[in-house]
Image (spheres, coloured by chain):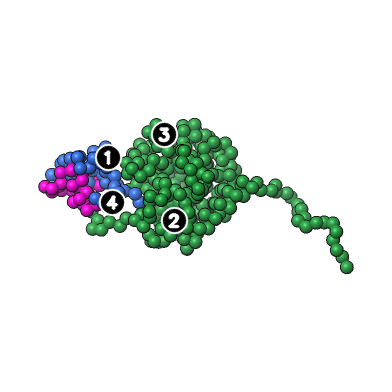
Amino acid sequence: MTIRLNGKNYALTEEIKTLHDLLEKLEIQGQVVIIEQNHQIIDRSSYPDTDVTSGDVIEIVHFVGGG
Amino acid sequence: MLEIGGKTFASRLLLGTGKYPDNEKQQQAVEASETNILTFSVRRLDVFAKEQNDPLAALDLSCYDLLPNTAGAKTAEEAVRLARLARASGMCDMVKVEVIGCDKTLLPDPIETLRAAEELIKDGFIVLPYTSDDLLLARRLEELGCHAIMPAASPIGSGQGILNPLALSFIIEQMSVPVIVDAGIGSPADAAYAMELGADGVLLNSAVAHAKDPVKMARAMKLAVEAGRLGFEAGRIEKKRYATASSPTTGISRP
């Protein structure tokens, strides 16, 4: 059970079933992030209902400084 | 008041983020600039880092309108994706379309910029494209429905100031939507000059963030933008070849 997370392979553990779980596991649930799963942007309110499955390509992005 | 896509802003200075010596200096400079609009980029979060350093943590983002850019995009498709990611934050509906066509000069790719702008307008964004100082391209972007046009003064981060005031003034005179001079501003004089040419606003980042004293420079830019705007509205005098006396030429007292 691995996913592709921000360009790297990431092994899923038992407790990660949804995007919300993944954010908790990564300890970034409090931050403003945007998630793209298999090239689809996922609505922030749907994280708890969106399953993470083996082979998913997930991008987690955020705002950084820029001009 | 600056008006973009139905929103009004008291400040005509748009400020970039990042590149500051530290978060505290950034926060103080943003405050000193009295800007209403901050620009950002969208990047991968370093999810594997032990500790997350949020570069924007010191800023109270609720006080500003956020203008994410699509920097990093080289095609319209990449720019559209970045814009949609930014909007999905739920924090913004404006986007600075930035599609770079040349790594050395960071000049925008006009064709890809146009394509991206078209798609994002259809998608309901408030679109502010970063563009060269080409009048015809600016016209095309306005015809598409762009909400402001943002021509460069000189290459991004170069601090060379306004290299072609004539080209910029052609754009300023012909656009109905706001023209915001973006990129290349190096000093308060450059910012004031842009505003005196009749620009509706100025967007800058490095000129403040890389200044020896960013907080003082932020205030200087705020004053320069205001001074330039007032000067434009007041209407400067014509230039003449020879002197015209300021003091009365009659009634001169002699011993």
Amino acid type assigned to the residue bearing label 4 in the image: Gln
Name, please, the residue furthest toward the bottom: B255
Closer-to-camera residue (B185/B51): B51
Is disc 3 placed on a helix, strand or loop? helix
Q: Which residues are magenta?
A: A6-28
State the CA–CA distance, disc 4 to disc 1: 15 Å
- Considering only order in the chain, which callout, 3 or 2, is on the residue closer to the N terminus? 2
Q: Position of residue B126 (x, y in %)?
A: 42, 38
Q: Badge 2: few (under 14), some or many (20 or more) residues near its Cα, within 10 Å?
A: many
The chain ID associated with circle 4 is: A
Determine which residue is flagged by label 4. A31
Q: Colour of chain A?
A: blue
Determine which residue is flagged by label 1. A43
Quarter in which the C terminus of chain B is drawn: bottom right
- Which one is closest to the eye, mark 4 or mark 3? 4
Describe residue B68's horizontal placement relative to residue B233 as left or right: left
Instruction: Check residue B30 in the rendering and tell me which mark sits there, or answer none.
Output: 2
Q: Badge 3: few (under 14), some or many (20 or more) residues near its Cα, within 10 Å?
A: some
Q: Position of residue B205 (x, y in %)?
A: 45, 53
Quadrant location of residue A19? top left
Amino acid type assigned to the residue bearing label 1 in the image: Asp
In the depicted structure, whether residue B196 falls above or below residue A50: below
